[in-house]
Image: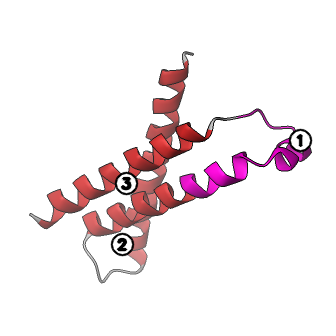
């Protein structure tokens, strides 16, 4: 699978999980709209991607986990994409 396709497949998988998590939060907690809950989940996923970017830069952690090196810009691009989708979901839901 080419790298771009793998990147978008991972972002799509995170988007599905974020959507399900936001819907679950809305069903359990309530007090906010479904679209706002989903947008929050996308923003939390974006923040998690930024944390992973910093963790992926640790050579010691990579050696300890025997994980392949992932370039930091991929995490940054994913965070930007997830944030943008969250904003779009929030704007469409409030309109």
Foreground mark, 1 or 2, reads 1
Q: According to the image, label 1 marks what residue?
A: 63
Image-quadrant location for residue 92: bottom left
Tag 1 secondary structure: helix
62 relative position to 53: left or right: right
Q: Position of residue 62 (x, y in %)?
A: 82, 43
Q: Residue at x 28, y 78 (%)?
A: 32
**Is 54 a magenta residue?**
yes
Does 47 sit above or below residue 53? below
Circle 1 crowding by C-alpha within 10 Å: few under 14, some 14–19, many from 20: few
Question: How far across and how far down the image is residue 73, in percent?
Answer: 54, 39
Q: Earlier in the sequence, mark 3 or mark 1?
A: 1
Q: Which residues are magenta?
A: 49-69
Q: Main secondary structure of the magenta part?
A: helix
Residue 26 — which label?
2
Report the Cα–Cα distance between label 3 and label 1: 30 Å
For marks 3 and 2, give the CA distance: 19 Å
Quick one: label 1 or label 2, which is nearer the N terminus?
A: 2
As displayed, is residue 40 above or below residue 88? below
Q: How many marks?
A: 3
**Which residue of the protein is positioned furthest toward the bottom in this rendering?**
31
Residue at position x 56%, y 55% in the image:
50
Disc 3: CA contacts within 10 A as few (<14), some (14-19) or many (>=20):
many
Query: Looking at the image, which residue is at 37% across and 73% down?
Result: 27
Q: From the image, tell me which residue sits under label 3.
A: 83
């Amino acid at each position: 699978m080419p790298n771009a396709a793998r990147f978008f497949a991972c972002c799509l998988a995170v988007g599905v999980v974020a959507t399900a998590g936001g819907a679950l939060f809305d069903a359990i907690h309530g007090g906010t709209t479904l679209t706002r809950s989903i947008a929050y989940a996308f923003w939390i996923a974006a923040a998690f991607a930024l944390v992973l970017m910093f963790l992926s830069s640790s050579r010691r952690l990579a050696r300890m986990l025997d994980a392949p090196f992932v370039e930091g810009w991929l995490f940054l691009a994913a965070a930007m994409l997830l944030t943008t989708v969250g904003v779009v979901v929030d704007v469409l839901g409030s309109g």
